[in-house]
Amino acid sequence: MSSDDAGQQTISIEDLPLAQLQNIKAQLEGEINELTGAFSQMKQAQGAFRECKRCIDALSPESQDKTILVPLSNSLYVPGKISNIDSVVVDVGTGYFVEKSAKDAGAYYDGKIDYVQGNAKKIQETVEQKQASYRGLLEVMQHKITQQQQQQQQPSGQKQAGTAAAGA
């Protein structure tokens, strides 16, 4: 036994009672739901960053003095004009905005897209691992339930056989 193993004991899930397995199942379901929600939020953020990047890429000399709708909130827009296609205002989070060149803003959003994509991939891998653990747990639970049902049927089956033999 190494010093790292001291104080740690491994217990197989097959050795746990059904009640504890049900608690573990509920915990795994909660974790999977949380991670799935986080993954969905990552995909939404990635989509928003891609849309911002697309808008920056769409700026051209023809865009100059073009009338657009400027968002003040998620549901409130006001008319405005594009006065400068060389610089844009970038939302950097928590209510802060920074003026950047269109090129720097595009690079900023590319970085954000890559960062969110990397995190989404990690979350997806974790979800897949948790789902595999969940499936394994369900198999063990089903096996234990089947064993319990067989044990409950055995004594009644033996009694019926003994009664039939006595009546003969």
Image: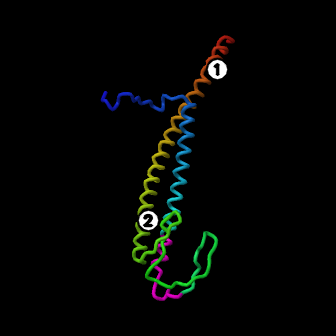
Q: Nearer the viewer, residue 161 or 154?
A: 154
Q: Position of residue 81 (x, y in %)?
A: 55, 84
Q: Residue at x 47, y 84 (%)?
A: 84
Q: Which mark is residue 156?
A: 1
Q: Nearer the viewer, residue 70 or 120?
A: 70
Q: In what element is the residue under mark 2?
A: helix
Quarter of the image where the C terminus is located: top right
Q: Badge 2 is on which residue?
A: 112
| Residue furthest to the left | 2
Which amino acid does the dot numbered 1 rest on?
Ser
Q: Residue at x 58, y 77 (%)?
A: 70
Residue 126 lies in the magenta stretch: no
Residue 62 lies in the magenta stretch: yes
Residue 167 falls left or right of residue 11: right
Residue 64 falls left or right of residue 162: left
Mark 1 vs 2, N-terminal side: 2
Rendered view: 152 above or below 63 = above
Q: Position of residue 125 (x, y in %)?
A: 44, 51
Q: Position of residue 151 (x, y in %)?
A: 58, 24
